[in-house]
Amino acid sequence: MTKKKTEPKQVSQYDKIFRENMEEALPGIIKHVLKLHILHSEELPDDIQHTKERKPDLLKKVADAAGEVYILHIEYQTESENNMIFRMAEYYIMLYRKYEIPVKQYVIYIGRGKPTMAFTIKTEDLWFRYNLLSLSAINYKIFLKSDKPEEKILAILANFEGDDSVVAIKRILQEVKAVADGDFAESRYFNQLRVLVQLRNLEIQFNEAMETITKFFKEERDPLFRRGEVKGRQEGKQEGKQEGKQEGKQEGVISIATEMKKEGIPLAQIAKFTKLSNEEIEKL
């Protein structure tokens, strides 16, 4: 992945996120972005050295549904690099020389706007090309269909398809929260999203969406959940306190479900978040 000269630390954060999540996110990338039908894959060393050393972002030997076996090489780019065509050509020659099987190469652009990199070389004695794709051209809802948080967070770099950005980000946060394995994992994915939104200039919208999510799901900060505790304390009895807490908690759950329903979130997803039945949600 390209390291910007002006912001090396920031770009290294993007690089780190994609390297950490790649194994889990790869099936979705292959299916929805590359449009490949891979049946089997195996790891390959990601250091290629003959006269010079190169370290690809992702390198695998794969077999597809048609029975074709080849090297799958993927690079992620945050900006259009003028020399990318030559880098990819160098990779191709070194990979083909080392493994002696076909090589398919993809550069996935995750930056702003449209990529402007050249992806072909045509001269009298050489013809070369790689595949150039952009995450911003893909509907973000496709990534949200996955049950893996590593795939779901890719939605932040995809196309919101006319949806309001705060609404779309809120939905992404809700979806990631629903499948994150505990508070630590949730915090990790939310922090990754906080970094990635900088690639889309959506920091303000992200913070607004985060405030809403916090209001919905953090009991200690939701007055509707706290109302029951106050009522219980005023009654001065443990039994009353517990009853009050339950009443307040139920009010909070109903409030959450109502807001989610207004946002057009599917009933099944609301039920998963709130533990309410579909019948209860439909009545709201």
Image (spheres, rainbow, N blue to C red):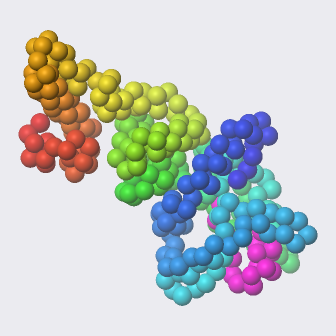
Residue 27 vs residue 6: left or right? left
What residue is drawn where x is 43% and y is 56%? 148
Residue 25 vs residue 56: left or right? left
164 falls in the magenta region = no
What residue is drawn where x is 53% and y is 31%? 203
Residue 272 x/y as whole percent: 24, 48
Residue 257 vs residue 85: left or right? left
Residue range (magenta): 91-107
Q: Against 44, is 202 above or below?
A: above
Residue 231 visible in the displayed image: no
Q: Nearer the viewer, residue 35 or 152?
A: 152
Q: Nearer the viewer, residue 82 or 102?
A: 102
What residue is drawn where x is 48% and y is 48%? 153
Residue 23 visible in the displayed image: yes
Residue 102 vs residue 35: left or right? right
Q: Nearer the viewer, residue 22 or 234?
A: 234
Q: Quadrant of residue 256?
A: top left
Q: Against 100, is 276 above or below?
A: above
Counting the numbered discs, the total is 0
Q: Against 132, is 100 above or below?
A: below
100 falls in the magenta region = yes
Q: What quarter of the picture does the C terminus occupy?
A: top left
Residue 1 x/y as whole percent: 70, 53
Residue furthest to the right: 51
Q: Nearer the viewer, residue 247 or 207?
A: 247
Q: Against 10, is 27 above or below?
A: below
Residue 139 x/y as whole percent: 43, 53
What residue is drawn where x is 39% and y is 58%? 146
Residue 215 x/y as whole percent: 33, 27
Q: Quadrant of residue 106?
A: bottom right
